[in-house]
Structures are given as C-alpha cells and as structure tokens.
Amino acid sequence: MLRTNTCGELGIKQKGKEVKLAGWVHTRRDHGGLIFIDLRDRYGLTQIVFDPENKKEFSAAEKLRREDVISVQGKVVPRKKGMKNPKLKTGEIEVEVSKIDILNKAKTPPIEVEDRKEAGEEIRLKYRYLDLRRPIMQKRLLVRHKAAQAAREYLNKENFMEIETPLLIRATPEGARDFIVPSRVSPGEFYSLPQSPQLYKQILMVSGMDKYYQLARCLRDEDLRQDRQPEFTQIDIEMSFIDEEDVYKLSEGLIKDIWKKAGNVKLKTPFPRLTYEEAMDKYGSDKPDLRFGLELIDVTDVVKDSDFKVFKEAESVKCLNPEKEFSRKDFDKYIDFCQKNGAKGMAWMRVTEKGLESNIVKFFNKDIQKELLDKTKAKKGSALMFIADKKKKTDEILGSLRLELGKDLDLINKKELKFCWITDFPLFEWDEDEDRWSPMHHIFSMPQDDKMKYLEEEPGKVTGKLYDLVLNGVELGGGSIRIHRKDIQEKVLKVIGMEYEEAEKRFGFLLNSFKYGAPPHGGIAFGFDRMSALLNGINDIREVIAFPKNKAAENPMDGCPTEVDEEQLKELHVKVEKVKKK
C-alpha cells in the first residue's frame, strides 16, 4: 500500500497516527535546518517535515524539486504555535517523515502548477496534463463529475433507461457540417458522426422504450468559439405519452437536483416562462439575461407621424432608456457597436431640463416629444438610444446593445441565477436568399394545436411545441414535442418545399418506423459542458473539458489532426489531394 490517506484529509484527530502519503512535490522550503514540503494530490495539500537527524531521508529531501513524485511514511503531529494555516483543510497538522521513496523525478515544468499564475491558452492546452494538476482545474472537473452523477441518479429514480446510440451513423442534414468516416469494407462509402442522437432517440420511443436518457457525445464540424467545441456532451432525454408540461416538470426537478448536489445551491421552481414573441419584444433575444431590466421600448406608433424619414419608413422603431448621462464620445462608441452588429446607425436623444436634445429633435414636434418622454419614462439626465429597421433586426441589435450596456453600466448581479423557459417558437422563418420558408428548428417539431390551421396559407403564424431553458442569457437546453403522425409531417414538409418522398430518402429509417405505430413523444437536450461551466461560475466550456480543442479545432497536446499513413489511406480507398496550409 503506497498510501493510507490522501493529502486532503488529515487533521488534529489523527494526531500521533502513523500514515503513508503519496503525491507531487508542490513547494519546498528550508527553515532552520528543517525541510518543509507541501505534498499535493487531487484531494489537497499536506505539509511534511524532514529532520536533519534522519540523515538518509533528509539528504533525499534536499534533492527534491517541484513535481517530483514521492511517497512518505511518518507520524501526524500538531503544527507549532503560530504555524497553523486556517486556509488549509490540513492546516493544523504536519507529518514528520521517517521514510521517503522517490517514485519519479520530474523535469522543470514549462507552466506553473498552481492557480495564482495561469499560463496562456495555447501552452496550457499543449501541456494539458500539467494544467489539469492545478487545484482549480481538478475542482472544475469534480463539479462536472458530480453534475453527471446527479443527472443519472435523478433520471434513474424517474424510471428512465440509459441507452447508448451509435456513433457511426448515416449522414442526415441537420444544419451544421458532419464529420465523416470512410468505410474500409464498403469502398467509396462513408459513415457520419452524430451531431445529436435526435433520430435514434425518436426511434427508441417507437420501440416502446418510453423513457430514455444518455450523456451523449455529439460532434459538429463548425467554427469554434467559447461555448462551442467540435465534440461536446448533452444530457439527452426523450419520453413517450407526454406534453410540454411533463417536460417542464421533469427538467426543473433535474436542474434543481444538479444545482443542489454539484453546486450546493437551492433553486426555486417553477421557473418563469416567456413566449418567444415576449422575449424578443422585451429583451431582443430568445435567450434573455433576466438579471437586469433595461427592456426594449416600442415607439413605432409614437414616431410614425414625425418628420424624421428614417423612423417614418421603418417597420419597427425601438429604444433603450439606460437612465444615465452619456457624452458624445459615449454615443459614438455605441453607434459603432450597433453598426458592427448590423445596424445602419443609432439615433440618440438626451433628456435635459429643457426637454429632449439632439441633432434629430427638430424633426419631432412638441407633442411627439412629450409622447416619447411619457412612453419611455425618461427623466432629466437620461438618454434614449434608438434603432429603426425591420422588426427582427431592430430587436436583435437593441438586444445586443442592452447586454453591452448591462456590462458597461454594471447592471448585472453576477451572483444571481435567473432561469426562464422560452416557449412557442415560430416553426418557420422566411429565408430571403432562398425565397422560401425554412424550419426554425428541426422538421419533426409539432405545431401548436391552435396554429395548425395556418400551416398551408400563413406559415409565419405557426408556432411550435418548442421550448428552451435559459440561464443568465445562456441557452442551457432545448427541445420539442415531436410530430408522430404522417399527415401532419407531410403538411410541415410541404411548407418548406420538401416532398414526403424526398424526406424519406433523407430520414427514411425514422419516417418508416412511424408507419408501425409511433406514440406521441418529445424531449429535451441540455448542453452538459455549458451546464458544467455555469456551475463553476465561468462561461468558457474549454475549462470544464479535460482535453478540449483550440480555436482552430486542433489539440496542441497530441497534435491532431495529423496526416494519415499512405497505406492506411489505400485500405480506406481514399485519395488525398494535398492543400498548402495558409
């Protein structure tokens, strides 16, 4: 036995106990003839002491360097008066070493294995095995582990079955690009890696599994950012014979349990709900951050009779009232921000003792100015910021500006957790480039019962049984009640210009299964990496993934992606045309 205890558990109760510890040398200090070493493992730090009277062990300790791997045997003793460390779990004791074994020597590490000095991202990823030794990284992965265990415990208790779906599948278009895998035994043919288990979990419902879940690995070949990786994990859930209320109830219980067990936080349920239309109207986003107010104010009707052409001709005019004075330089900064987010410009007005002031006020008569002040409730010392465009664009630009102002004006309470459901998403959106309707989510989402009548003539009015769970402006998960009837599926496909026969070519194995008695079913998938990051109080999912890729979808540690041996390519019947790297 190399150890009887870990480096994070000994205390004054173990005084006088003979113990064995093993771990890495974290720091070494020489004091008054004694050598003190902080020995580190995953569980914490324990101070060990070498006395010069024990010549052999003391001599070995003199040669120790950071990250050497050792095991020691010794007695637990209280630290001397004034030497206790209240910040450390083991801070009341130390271990007087009687024997040491050096298990492995270490080169000087290229990065510091401590939390106070964080290296740059690329070198952290290259030496990830060292980066993962840092206490903060081990804490983050432990929170992730607890969240996974809590999810499994909760869903098992609710009578769900954990079922794995395949990783080598038929390619089906789902929006993002697939990763493809050549088949050696079927020359010229390819598997696809799943972007999600969507089709398979629906087939499991047709199979009578009733309640399924999986911590599913998903893969998408897309451009990366903080909350995206080419491979990621979902808590994937599907149920039969249910409606939206069943999904809300189950999900809220699951999230409540995870936050309690992995984050030590008690959440209040039920979570508030907003329709998609309400969220866009008030916050300019379908994933609103509810930790602060600053809602969008619709002034389209107020300004339509003004002489300002930009406002008169716009489909929608909305503004924000941040209740703060701004300089001309401030306005210019936010105009630039809005333009980078797709706006043609941003109009503004200051509220002074004399009323509204700006270079466009002359286009608004006194009555309209008074209406503006009444509608916006703007007081002296405040400013109004306007965007005029098509409704969706106006909402989205002002929604981005709202978030920017929330950060700049310190309106966000970072300790708050504000969950909400966004419901009743449009089933279709108009694609101007293609001049046709396209599905806003996936084509298997069930329309709302009272909107079914609009499917053929007015698809823009059709909302679906779709829902997202949002936390602090981040989409935590989403799903829908699925279409399980052929006649409804045909109508939905017709709206997007796809014949049922074409859909069968693409998704035939799912649609064919429906012919043999598909139950009403639906589900939800939660982004587990994103959830783990938020549980740790951070946003970057790379910090909670053991071996993530960088922004170029490369792993600096193992060097992938790499070229493949020519012989292996021959076996796969693949010919590579080499492209010069930019």
Image: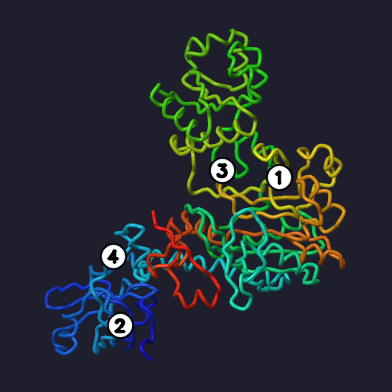
Residue indicated by mark 3:
289
Q: Position of residue 345 (x, y in %)?
A: 51, 25
State the CA–CA distance, disc 3 to disc 1: 27 Å
User: Which residue is painted at 65% across and 63% down in the image?
Assistant: 171
Return the residue at label 2. Answer: 76
Q: Closer to the N terminus: mark 3 or mark 4?
A: 4
Tell me how far mark 3 sits from mark 4, CA to CA: 36 Å
- The answer to whether the residue labelled 1 contacts the one labelled 2, judged by CB atoms less than 8 Å apart, is no
Badge 2 element: strand
- Asked if residue 260 shows in the view, the reply is no
Upstream in sequence: badge 3 or badge 1: 3
Residue at x 79% of width, y 45% of height = 495
Where is residue 304 drawn, in percent x and y? 65, 16
- Of badges 4 and 2, nearer the viewer stands 4
Q: Which residue is mark 4?
A: 111
Secondary structure under tag 1 reads strand
Query: Which of disc 2 and disc 1 is earlier in sequence?
Result: 2
Task: First in sequence, mark 4 or 2: give its number.
Answer: 2
The residue carrying mark 1 is 438
Q: Is the residue marked by circle 2 packed among few (<14), some (14-19), or many (20+) residues within 10 Å?
A: many
Q: Residues within 10 Å of mark 4 (few under 14, many from 20)?
A: some
Mark in front: 3 vs 4: 4
